Image: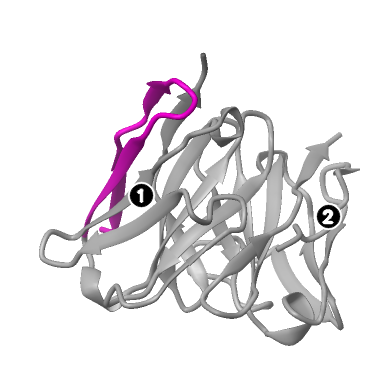
Amino acid sequence: QVQLVESGGGVVQPGTSLRLSCVTSGFTFSNYPLHWVRQAPGEGLEWVAVISYDGTNKYYADSVKGRFTISRDNSKGTQYLQMNSLRHEDTAMYYCAREVNTAMDWGRGTLVTVSS
Amino acid sequence: QSALTQPRSVSGSPGQSVTISCTGTSSDVGGYNYVSWYQQHPGKAPKLMIHDVTKRPSGVPGHFSGSKSGNTAYLTISGLQAEDEADYYCCSYAGSYSFVFGTGTKVTVL
């Protein structure tokens, strides 16, 4: 059974940093690209970042480029999202997703609140 | 990276059909046959309903179907059921490993 479990969310002040983790199981982790997708309260889904199966290619939404870094550890079956210089508008549920043939399997999400 | 355009809401009575549109550009919806649709109930994670424009994963009810014409993709729910009431999001591959989501549509079963 495929499982993706996010953690690391919380309440932080603007300008600070946070690292999210996504621990996976039930599939061969190193075979799949992985994504982060976020959803602000009451809003729609926003694609954030993707990392290729081997970690060599990484792409970001313009809204987070230069502030967020996606990474993965294939030996641990875990991906990460390092979020720096956080802003109020980064407040959202952050979902980890596995890409399977251009569609996505989702975790349950971890909530990040940026508030002063 | 502009969001794909969906109607804010659609509604129908049980047994009726509803269709949700998803309009993008030639750089996303029109450029690839990689449109997927996700259903999201309140407080839950999104669930894949359609991928590659028309393909339905195992376990997804047969009254969900997808199509595409030009820069617009469509999700049709035939024979609307109470449990279909949810938010629906389209998603398209946009090149360079990236994806773009639609603005979301709330489906109400009257």
Mark 2 surroundings within 10 Å by alpha-carbon count, few (fewer than 14), some (14 through 19), many (20 or more): many
Query: Residue B81: x and y, percent?
Result: 73, 45
Quadrant in the rendering for residue B83: top right
Tell me if residue B97 comes above or below residue B1 in the rendering: below
Say which quadrant the N terminus of chain A sits in.
bottom left
Which label belongs to residue A81? 1
What residue is pinned by disc 2? Answer: B6
Q: Is residue A7 left or right of residue B75?
A: left
At x 46%, y 48%, the residue is: A67
Is A47 left, or right, of B80 in this rendering? Answer: left
**Amino acid type of disc 1?**
Leu
Q: Is residue B26 magenta?
A: no
Name the front one of labels 2 and 1.
Answer: 1
Residue type for callout 2:
Gln
Residue at 53% in and 44% down? A38
* B18 to A8, vertically: above or below: below
Q: Residues within 10 Å of mark 1 (few under 14, many from 20)?
A: many
Q: Nearer the viewer, residue A52 or B16?
A: A52
Q: Chain of mark 2?
A: B
Instruction: Please tell me whether residue B36 is drawn above or below residue B103 in the rendered image.
Output: below
Q: Position of residue B45 (x, y in %)?
A: 50, 43
What residue appears at the point 88 percent right and 42 percent down from the top-left corner? Answer: B11
- Subunit ID for the residue under disc 1: A
Which structural element holds mark 2?
A: loop
The residue stretch that appears in magenta: A1-25
The image quarter containing residue A34 is: bottom left
